[in-house]
Amino acid sequence: MTARDERTAMSGGGIVVVFVGVLLTMLMGALDQTVVTTAAWPIVRDLDPAGGLDGMSWIVVSYMLASTATQPIYGKLADLLGAKKVYVTAVVLFLVGSALCGAAQNMGELIAFRALQGVGAGGLYSVALVVIGLMTTPQQRAKFQGVGGAVIGLSTVVGPLIGGYFTESHDILGITTNWRWLFYVNLPLGALALGVVVLLLRIPVRRTNQQIDFIGAALIVAAACSVLLVTEWGGDTYAWSSPTIITMSVAAVLLSVAFVRRQRRAADPLIPLRLFKDRTVALSIPILFLVGFALIGSIVHVSMYLQVVYGYTPTQAGSRMLPMTVGFMISAIGSGIIVSKFGRYKAFPILGSVFSAGGLALLGTMDPDTSVTLLCTYIFLIGLGVGLLMQLMVLVVQNAVPRTDLGVATTTSTFFRTLGQSFGAALFGAILSARLNSTTGGAHLGNLGALPEASRHTYLVQYTDAATDVFLIAGAIMLIAAVLGLFLREMNLEELEDDPAVDEGQAGGQPAGPAAAPDAGSLPASAELPAQTGRPAVGTGPDSR
């Protein structure tokens, strides 16, 4: 059975049902990174009110470190062992971690179980994109991944609202909620999604003699954790000039260099450097990094701006962020439908970068008297831009590589986007703090309510000036993404005959049949045959239609 035959067998209602199951697990993984932000303090009060405050940030950080650092490993495992097996394993790990988090009796247990949950979450989103890529044709991917991206975008805003709601002891069907239900609610939803995926998902798996590069895996996990801890601790827990941050920064650089050297020499590299020889991949991944940068620059600091300048609670600020999510959903789904229909995409990354840069630049014009309506209009524009970029650029990378590299290329894309988010949070936070310290003499936001009205207004003006600097810099960064987008090669998303494969559901994992030669008449005139695989690349010509 060929990969095309397998996808045909899953067409129609079957593929939609499986997609809903996959989408549900993606949503759970994304929500669990954000729901805890508003629930962290109630959790500390319950588990360790005396000394738990010092470990409060680790409830979020342990999950983030584990989920980010494992993404490249999941990609390679998906290529070697089959995406379905790896995805099911990730879901099981996530559910086990969720159950243990809900039952945690102290902060140490919760932090450890959050790390386990994060290990599973590292595959929920990244391998989900691989699964979608394997069970759909190239043109169908745009539509399905557009919907997936919209749901993930929704989770960034809705997550804190859900976290706040569950921790406020509401009565649901006779059950009084508390923070533990943030984790327990994953169990029935995850079990349902897991059942759908196990029973209905049929995607190809290939036999291979390749092996996991364990040394490379250890190096990239260590390098990623070092980078993430620097961005998480720098300027907050430790000063940027502190020995701890300097040491970890040096370690991050040395480990990254060692990883690259290892990938050059390894027989089966974790992230094949040859992927970056393709111009599309070499441009798309930096664009994704910059998108992550801008996403954090807008969401984190717009939410903070709403709380500081307008006096909203975190929940109220989250509700005012919904226009961004609406814009994201409209553009992500809309662009996916358009690309699925016409098969061309190059205009969208450029438009998305320009829209995002424009929205951020408009945020940079605000003052304390700017209306909330205008602010919501500006972030709606940012949402439109990011929606045209985030999922579509992953699709572009998938379309540029052979199917044998689909897993590692997909997870490499999401990995660098996540790193961009971490760098954005660190850089913009440092800029805001430095700007405030230079104008306010180090006055803290926590003292704002005790200031006289005149002094308070002066401080708000100074804070607004600092925040708008952040937005303007973020806008300039997105213009760089627009320039990179100009050099992308236009590709049509063609449905070509794929490699012979076996159905993961077949017993024994034996090949379904001999390799079928591709029909030369079905190939576009400009299709290239990658030297390493001898197979037609998907739409690699400048205009393959």
Image (cartoon, helix red, strand yellow):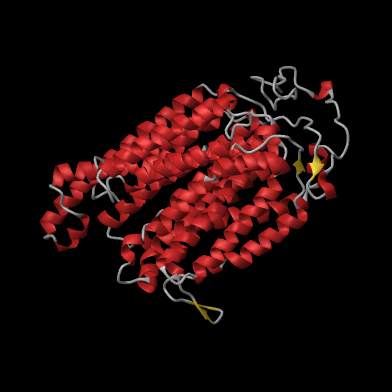
Task: Classify residue 81 as left or right of residue 300.
Answer: right
Which residue is located at x 35 percent, y 66 percent? 41
Q: Does residue 340 appear anywhere in the picture?
A: yes
Picture quadrant where residue 210 is located: top right
Q: Position of residue 156 (x, y in %)?
A: 47, 53
Residue 48 falls left or right of residue 394 = left
Q: Is residue 402 above or below residue 248?
A: above
Q: Residue at x 58, y 58 (%)?
A: 94
Residue 146 horizontal/vertical position (percent)? 60, 44
Compared with 532, 469 (above or below) is: below
Residue drawn 24% across the image and 50% down it = 369
At x 28% / y 51%, what residue is drawn? 237
Furthest toward the bottom, the residue is 174
Q: Nearer the viewer, residue 7 or 251?
A: 251
State the residue in front, 38 or 63: 63
Question: Quadrant of the image for the N terminus?
Answer: top right
Q: Which quarter of the picture shows residue 381?
A: top left
Q: Extreme top residue here? A: 525
Question: Residue 11's x, y, as percent?
Answer: 78, 46
Image quadrant where residue 465 sits:
top left
List the single residue furthest toward the right.
Answer: 513
For the C terminus, the quadrant is top right
